[in-house]
Image (tube, grey):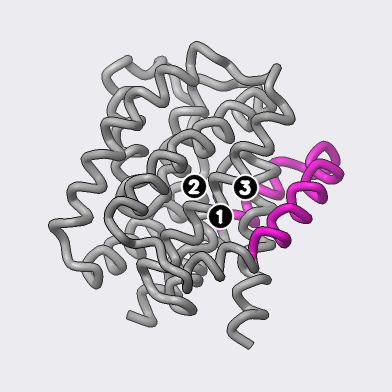
Amino acid sequence: MTWVWLLLIVFVAYLVQSITGFGGVLLSLPLVILLVGFDDARLLTTALSLVTGLIVSSTHYRQINKKKLGLILLVMAVGTAFGMILDRLLDARFLILLYGVVTVLLAIFRLLPKRQESRSPTPFFLFGILLLAGIMQGLFVAGGAFLMIYAIYEFPDKTEFRATSSAVWGILNIFMMIVYGYSGRINTGNLKLVAICIPVVLAMIFLAEKIQARIKQAVFAKLTNVLLLASGLILLVSY
């Protein structure tokens, strides 16, 4: 049953990722941690986000905002490196609890009614959001929620955001897989997990291309946030 649950979680989470450009790790990691452990869960979600990001971004290459992609990668790379340093200094159990708390808070924030912004955010605010996205990526492979906040202001076109953010995950996660390899975190066990889940992810990408134009974005966003909240609560209760 463990494999059945794992594949079901991966399918739902990375279907969301392929349709929206983010959310795969946020939805899957809390539950995958419970199934396979913290380190294997992070490596699995990193590899799957890498594959999803590269395929979706290459399919929609013309919609990528190259200028903003470069800026996002530069700032998030700094944050990611800092997050990976923190990962070596902090206890794994503390990181799991921190991730659960952050997941729940982000879900609640995204479910609250949004007020119309009267002023544009400052460049300093946007820089800070991207830096936080990078730190979350380095710690939990989960910078998508903060990148989504950045996108609210900088990507009015959701197609452009989907393509650009997918490129971000593809490129950043190549870097993270290299670091995992050098640190000895890649082994036959987690590579087996990746190999089993990859076909599901490929099928999901194909399905996402068929349904993403038909789905109502507002309804889908609310459902995603409810799932996100549930995942975080399950992780906190379990630990």
Q: Amino acid at mark 1?
A: Asn
List x then y, in percent, for residue 90: 16, 61
Upstream in sequence: badge 2 or badge 1: 2
Q: Which residue is mark 1?
A: 225
Total labels: the figure holds 3
Q: Is residue 153 above or below residue 77?
A: above
* Residue at 36%, 69% in the rendered image: 38
Horizontal side of residue 7 vs 193, given as left or right: right
Q: Residue furthest top?
A: 67
Question: Which one is nearer the viewer's eye here, 200 or 217?
Answer: 200
Residue 110: assigned label: 2
For the view shown, which residue lies furthest in the left direction? 89
Sequence order check: which comes first, mark 1 or mark 3?
3
Provide the residue span drawn in magenta.
Answer: 197-225
Image quarter of the N terminus: bottom right
Q: Secondary structure at mark 1?
A: helix
Q: Nearer the viewer, residue 109 or 151?
A: 151
Whether label 3 touches label 2, CB < 8 Å:
no
| Label 2–label 1 contact, CB within 8 A | yes
**Marks 3 and 2: which is nearer the front?**
3
How far apart, in angstroms, are the residues tagged by discs 3 and 2? 17 Å
Relative to 116, 239 lies left or right: left
At label 3, the amino acid type is Gln
